[in-house]
Image (spheres, grey):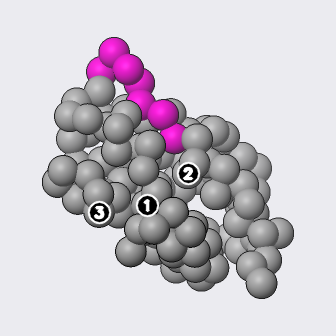
Amino acid sequence: MINYDFKPQSYFDGQLPNALLVKLIYPESQWGEEICIYANVMDGLIYYEAVDFYGNDLKLNPEKTKESLSLQELIMMIETLEPEQEFSQGNIAFTLSGIPQAESLFYPELKKYFLDKRKFYGLS
């Protein structure tokens, strides 16, 4: 059973002000799109940023928090990712409508969540 309330103590080890939270891979997209979500700490707040190969500006909700996200909050962030329409490159909106494969050092159960969801919809 997945613990949706799981929340890492911190994303930062005291040496770097940023961390790769999750890598999303969309195998059904034309080019095997990858999106990485990073956490950056500044002035006591954690700011989140999503980066893809094309440099698309992606909206995250929430954009910032005072503490690390629970697994459930991270899943919601991923599932509600949206491109800034006026600046998007490629077919990012279509890609985001898919179900990604996910990898995260901070959220070990995230991979299982998306694997189970992909299996439910007949994706490998």
> Between marks 1 and 3, how big is the CA–CA gap?
7 Å
Element at label 3 = loop
- The residue identified by callout 1 is 100
Q: Nearer the viewer, residue 74 or 114?
A: 114
Give the residue drawn at x 26%, y 35%. 91
Element at label 1 = loop
Q: Nearer the viewer, mark 2 or mark 1?
A: 1
Q: Earlier in the sequence, mark 1 or mark 3?
A: 3
Q: Tell whether label 1 touches label 2 (CB within 8 Å).
A: yes
Q: Specify whether 82 is left or right of 92.
A: right
Element at label 2 = helix
Furthest toward the top, the residue is 86
Residue 84 located within the stretch drawn in magenta: yes
- The residue identified by callout 3 is 27
Give the residue drawn at x 26%, y 52%. 29
Image quadrant where one finds the N terminus: bottom right
